[in-house]
Amino acid sequence: MNMMSEAAVEKALDQKMNDVSYKMVGKDVSVYYGEKRALFDVNLNVRENTVTALIGPSGCGKSTFLRCLNRMNDTIESCRVTGRITLDADDIYDPSIDVVELRARVGMVFQKPNPFPKSIYENIAYGPRIHGLARNKADMDQIVEASLQRAGLWNEAKDRLQESGTGLSGGQQQRLCIARAIAVSPEVILMDEPCSALDPIATAKVEELIHELRSNYTIVIVTHSMQQAARVSQRTAMFHLGQLVEENDTDKMFTNPDDQRTQDYIMGRFG
Amino acid sequence: MSQVVTPSATPAAARPRVRRDIGIKRRYAAERRFRAYGIAAILFGLVFLFMLLTSVVSKGYTAFQQTMITVPIEFSEQVIDPNKERATNPQKLLTANYPVLARNAVAKVLGVAENDRTKMREVGQMLSDSVRAQLRDLVVANPSIIGTTQSVRLLAAGDLDSAFKGQIDLDVTESNRKISDQQVGWMKQMAEAGTLAKHFNTGIFVNGASSRPEAAGVGVALIGSFYMMLIVLVLALPIGVAASIYLEEFAPKNRFTDLIEVNINNLAAVPSIVYGLLGLAVFINFMGLPRSASLIGGLVLTLMTLPTIIIATRAALKAVPPSIRAAALGLGASKMQTIFHHVLPLAMPGILTGTIIGLAHALGETAPLLLIGMVAFVANYPTTPLDPSTALPVQIYMWANEAERAFVERTSGAIIILLLFLIAMNVGAILLRRRFERRW
C-alpha cells in the first residue's frame, strides 16, 4: 500500500515535471504524400533540453515526423499534414505562425553534410545575417567564433575561415552544418541521421557534440544506429509503418521495452 | 613426387578449368567499334570545319587589303571653282567635278595626253567613283588646299583591285573581261613605280553600304548588330531569368504550367522567319515603330532568344542540388532569399552559357531581319537604335547577291568578321563562367 502510493506520487511528480518541460508536443499528427498516408495519428512529445532519438526501420515515418517539426514538409507539394504540433504551446501550423520564424527557432541538420559552397565564415554568418542578429562586423565575428567553438570546429577552422566550406572533410562539414544551425540560436535542433555519411571517428565527434549541446538545446535526432540512439539520447521513440510504437526513456527502451515490436527491432529481428 | 607430376590422379584436379564464355571478346569488340564510330564522327566534323574555315579564309583574307593609287593631285582652282564663287555659294565646293582632278593626276603619272579622250576614259575607269566624295571631303574640310598639290591615296576601282589581286583571269579575251589590256599595262607600270599598291583596308570595317565594292564596308552593319545585341541582352536576360525562376521555383505544377512549358519548348523550335512575321505584324504594323530600325531587330531577336534562355536557365536551376535549398530553408531563409542567395549564384554559369549561346544565335540570325526591313541599303551610320540600319549577317546576305568579283572576297571577309565576333563572345562566356565558378 505504502509502496503503491510512493510510486503513484513519483509518477505524479514525474508527470508534473514532464508537463512543464515539454518543448514540442505532437498530437494526432498524420502526414499524407498525395494519396499515400505516411504517418498515422502520432502523439509524441519532445522534452526540453533532452535528446530524443527517433528509431525504426526504413520508411517508418521517423524522418517524416522530424520534418513536420520545422515544416520542411511544406516544400513537398503533395504533402499534407493534419493534427497539431506545438512549440511552447504555439501551434506551428497555425496561419499566424510564420514558417521562416519557426525555422529560425527550430534548426535542422541534414543527413548529408550540405555546407553552402562559400567560405566557412560565410556559412556560419549567413543565418544571423538574414535574421539580422548581428549589428556590426564585430558582432558577427563573435557569433561565428562562438558557433564554431560550440561545434568543436574552432581550433580546426580558425585559420581557414575564408576557405571554402566544401573543402573540409565530411565530419568537419557536418560539424560546420551544426555550427551553422547553432548560429541562429535556435531552441530546438532537428538532426536527420547526421552521422550516416561519416566515418566512426567523425561520428564520435558529432555524438560528443550532441551530448554537449543538450544543456542548451532541445535535440531530436533520427538515427538508424541503435548504438547511437543508446549513446546520445535520453528519450527514444520507436516508429513502425507510420505509427509510433513506443516512446520511453532510452535506458528502459533498450533494456526492457514495453512493446514486443520494439524488442524485436532492437534485437535485430526485423528492420 | 609422382602425384605432383601427374596431378590428374585426383578427379578434382583432373578436370581442366573450363572458362565460361561470357562474351568478353564480343564486348571488347563492341567497345572498339563504338570508339571507332566516335572518332569517325569527330573526324567528319573536323573535316567540314576545316573546309569551311579554309574556304572562307582563303576567299576572304584578301578583303582586308585594298588596292590604292597614291598620286600627287593638283587641286586646280580652274576645275574646282573656275568662277571663284565659293565665297558666296557654298554649294560650289560640294558639286565641283572632283573625279577630273583624280583622273588628270593619274594620267599625268602614266604620261597620257589629256586630249586623248578614249584613253582618258579608261584612266578614269581605273579609279573608284568614291574619289569624288573623298576629294570633296578634303576640300570642304580645308578649302585652302585649292591651288596646291597634295599627295592623296585614292581607291582603285573594284575591277582593277580584283585584277591586281589576281582574281580576274587575264588570259580571257579582252572583250570578255572588265579590264582592258591597256589598263592592265598601266596597272603593272604603276605597281612597279610604287604608285599602285595594296594597303590595309580600314574601309571594310567603317564604311556603310555602297554599290561600289571597293567602297563598301560593314560599318553600319556592325553598329546595327551591336545595338541589337545590346537590346537582346538587356531585355532577354532579365525577362528570361525571371520567367524561369518563377516557372521553376514558384509556379504551381498544374495543367496550365505544363502547357506553358510545352509551349516554351516548342517556341525554341519555331523557324526564325516566323518571328520576323510576328515582329512585322506587331512592332511595325500595329505599334507603328520605324522600319529597318535596330530596335525592332533587337525586339524580334529578343523574342526569338527568350525560349533558349528560359530552357537553359531552368536546366541550370534544376541542376542545383536540393540539399543547398534545404540547407537555406532549414536556416529560416525565405524562398526568395534561398533562390537569390544560393540557387541563382550556383546556376549562374549555366545561365550565362545559355544566354551567350542565345546571343550568338541571334547575332547570326538573318531571316527575321529580312522581314522587318533590315535588308536595306544604308550608307549612313545609325546614331540611335531607331535609325535605319542593317546587321552583319544581312550584309553578308546582300553582298552574296552582288555580281562583281570584288564582292566575293568581301562576302567572305564579312563572314570572317562575324566569326571573329562569335569567337570573342564565346571567349567572353568562358571567362565569365570561370569568374563565377571561382567565386564559389
Image: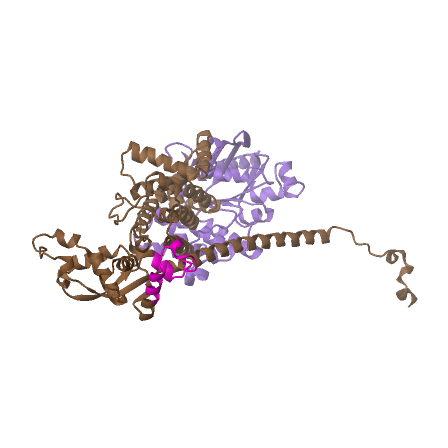
Which residue is depicted at the point 61% across and 52% down?
B37
Horizontal and vertical percent position of residue A11: 52, 36
Task: Decide which of B33, A69 is in the foreground and name it.
Answer: B33
Q: Chain B's colour? A: brown
> Is B363 one of the magenta-colored residues?
no
Asked if residue B287 is positioned above or below residue A251 in the image, the reply reads: above
Question: Which colour is chain A painted?
Answer: purple
- Quarter holding the C terminus of chain A is top right
Camera sees residue A125? yes
Q: Residue at x 14, y 64 (%)?
A: B147
Q: Does any portion of residue A188 appear in the rendered image?
A: no
Q: In the image, residue B378 lies at what x, y percent?
A: 28, 46
Question: Which scheme is used to colour this image of the protein?
Answer: by chain
Instruction: Please tell me which residue lies in front, B93 or A96.
Output: B93
Q: Is residue B179 magenta?
A: yes
Report whether A111 appears left or right of A266.
Answer: left
Residues in magenta? B159-188
Taking the view exactly as shown, the residue that stands out farthest to the left is: B88
Q: Is residue A221 above or below residue B113?
A: above
Q: Residue furthest bottom?
A: B193
Front-lying residue, B427 or B202: B202
Q: Position of residue B34 (x, y in %)?
A: 63, 51
B24 in relation to A76, above or below: below
Picture quarter with the N terminus of chain A: top right
